[in-house]
């Protein structure tokens, strides 16, 4: 069971803080998402807490940033664009922070490859990249207790090819 004040990752909302645990009528976490324009407190049943996960530790976050250049991309071999988008969204929702960072790296490379052919990347690529980037930066920011801008700077220090607006 998660404690009040602890940061967790909700599959749909991303990083949230546990505000309280309500006991009636059933045990429920009251979560406050950290991202979003107008975050609203949400309830989540304690019975389903296996769908939640704790935020990565400080050491895991540092190791992930240090290893960014060596991370592999995620290959998808399906033929349908809709199924591909669903696959990557599922990686972001249900995967670890490392999975989200790998999705970011995958779509940075895909977008760069499409642009190198003087074409405009599909909107779905940009959408998936934004979602994965926001999710991973927020989690790393909380784990390292620094603003997201500083997390971006750490990525740039360890891998000069890391470009924010790619």
Image: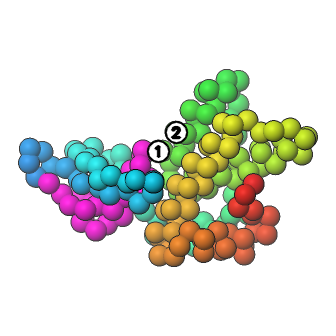
Q: CA distance from mark 2 to mark 1?
A: 6 Å
Percent from the top left, x then y, of residue 131? Answer: 57, 48
Asked if disc 2 and disc 1 are in contact, CB closer than 8 Å, the reply is yes
As helix, strand or loop, the secondary structure at mark 2 comes to helix
Q: Residue at x 70, y 53 (%)?
A: 105
Q: Nearer the viewer, residue 126 or 69?
A: 126
- Residue 8 appears in view: no
Left or right, 113 with reference to 9: right
Residue lying at the far top in this picture: please name it: 80
Residue lying at the far front in this picture: please name it: 38
- Residue 5 appears in view: yes
Q: Magenta segment, which residues? A: 1-22
7 magenta-colored: yes
Left or right, 79 with reference to 141: right
In the image, residue 55 sits, relative to residue 111, either above or below, namely below
Percent from the top left, x then y, of residue 151? Answer: 60, 71
Q: Count residues near mark 2 (Cα–Cα under 10 Å), then give few for <14, some for 14-19, many for 20+.
A: some
Q: Which of the labelled discs sits on residue 163, or is there none? A: none
Q: Residue at x 56, y 68 (%)?
A: 148
Q: Residue at x 42, y 44 (%)?
A: 12
Q: In this figure, which residue is indicated by the disc labeled 1?
A: 94
Q: How many marks?
A: 2
Q: Residue at x 33, y 52 (%)?
A: 40
Left or right, 100 with reference to 2: right
User: Which image quarter holds the N terminus?
Assistant: bottom left
Q: Which of the labelled discs sits on residue 90, or is there none? A: 2
In the image, residue 77 sits, relative to residue 13, either above or below, namely above
């Amino acid at each position: 069971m998660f404690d009040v004040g602890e940061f967790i990752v909700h599959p749909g909302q991303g990083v949230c803080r546990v505000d309280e645990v309500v006991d009636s009528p059933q045990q429920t976490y009251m979560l406050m998402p950290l991202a979003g324009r107008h975050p609203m407190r949400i309830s989540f049943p304690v019975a389903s807490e296996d769908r939640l996960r704790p935020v990565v530790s400080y050491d895991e976050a540092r190791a992930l940033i240090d290893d960014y250049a060596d991370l592999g991309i995620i290959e998808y071999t399906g033929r349908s664009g809709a199924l591909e988008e669903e696959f990557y969204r599922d990686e972001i929702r249900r995967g670890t922070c490392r999975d989200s960072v790998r999705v970011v790296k995958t779509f940075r490379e895909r977008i760069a490859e499409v642009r190198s052919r003087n074409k405009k990347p599909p909107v779905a690529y940009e959408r998936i990249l934004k979602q994965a980037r926001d999710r991973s930066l927020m989690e790393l920011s909380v784990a390292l207790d620094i603003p997201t801008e500083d997390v971006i700077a750490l990525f740039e220090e360890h891998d000069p090819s890391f470009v924010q607006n790619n």
